[in-house]
Amino acid sequence: MTSGAATGSNAERELVLTRLIDAPREKVFKAWTEPELLMQWFAPLPFTTPSAKVDLRPGGASLIVMRDPEGNEFPNPGVFLEVVPNKRLVSTDAYTEAWVPSEKPFMTLILTFDDVGGKTRYTARARHWTVADRETHEQMGFHEGWGKATDQLEALVAKL
Amino acid sequence: MTSGAATGSNAERELVLTRLIDAPREKVFKAWTEPELLMQWFAPLPFTTPSAKVDLRPGGASLIVMRDPEGNEFPNPGVFLEVVPNKRLVSTDAYTEAWVPSEKPFMTLILTFDDVGGKTRYTARARHWTVADRETHEQMGFHEGWGKATDQLEALVAKL
């Protein structure tokens, strides 16, 4: 693909986290899509998630707010591109609502929830428009932050 | 919206063409979505449209190729975000397929087909991520080019 060649292949523009979670995928999907659950795990501690809005449909907006220990808030607006219940969720920050372009298209998040004998193979792919943005995201601590958030997700679904 | 304030309001980032077309909206929608029809009107003459591929569903890819009189080809890849038959069509060049980020997210195209007593109020909105991109698009000849293409669209649907 010419655009891939120009800006880097998907692999070069992508950050991936994958984990086998000991819970059925319905629960993991639920933890990603119900605000009251998202607020319990989304931001890696000591950050918290004071609010989450989720309009779960293609074109629906989501707004998850993270708060740091000093009380500064970081809103994460986005729009869903694909919603396949219990299986797949795709969203992007390129829009703040359907179809209002955001300040900067930074990434598209592709989440897959695969059933593995009753457990869930959970994979989160953050696909960026440029290699530079992928590098920035990595330097911002993608692996550590998402790893910690996924620990919290795992602990939450174990209790559901 | 903070992102709107930072990068310009929708109005500042948008180019709009609207026209009342003397044909039912089913025909206008068809001319926009069937490759063999698109090839007959899409590129403003003396440009032509040698090929068009349309996978008409949210997440489906489209690839319309324009050719100039010297034979140079200009591919226009995009992905559909919304498909409401005979009413509304939204696509973007931010992806080349679902969900592969393109080289540069330039615009989102929002087409609406409204019934006005058997005629069609046709509106095409090209919404850009930045004011600068809107200006570039305007300087590339958006109004003249789209105006001419819409003349061709109008002439074609009159014969359907």
Image: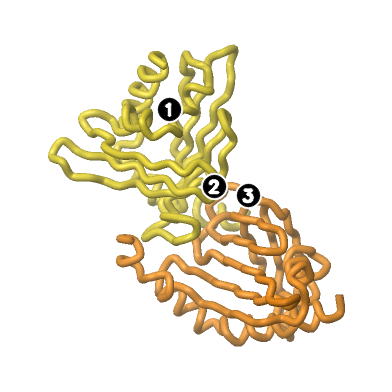
Chain colours: A orange, B yellow
Percent position of residue B46, x then y: 20, 30
* Extreme residue in the right direction: A159
* Residue A119: quadrant of the picture: bottom right
Contact? badges 2 and 1 (CB < 8 Å): no
Measure the alpha-carbon separation of dots 2 and 1. 19 Å
Contact? badges 2 and 3 (CB < 8 Å): yes
Residue A134, relative to residue B100: is it above or below? Answer: below
Quarter placement of the N terminus of chain A? bottom left
Instruction: Nearest to the eye among marks 2 and 1: give it.
Output: 1
Badge 2 amino acid: Leu
Measure the alpha-carbon separation of dots 2 and 3. 8 Å
Instruction: Nearest to the eye among marks 3 and 1: give it.
Output: 1
Q: Which residue position holds label 2? A: B81
Q: Nearer the viewer, residue A60 or A123?
A: A123
Measure the alpha-carbon separation of dots 3 and 1. 25 Å
> Circle 2 — which element?
strand
* Tag shown at residue A59: 3
* Residue A43: quadrant of the picture: bottom right
Q: Nearer the viewer, residue B30 or A135?
A: B30
Residue A20, relative to residue B96: is it above or below? Answer: below
Q: Residue at x 55, y 72 (%)?
A: A125
Q: Indicate the chain on which mark 1 is placed.
A: B
Badge 3 amino acid: Gly
Q: Which residue position holds label 1? A: B31
Label 2 neighbour load within 10 Å: few <14, some 14-19, many 20+: many
Q: Disc 2 or 1, which lies upstream in sequence? A: 1
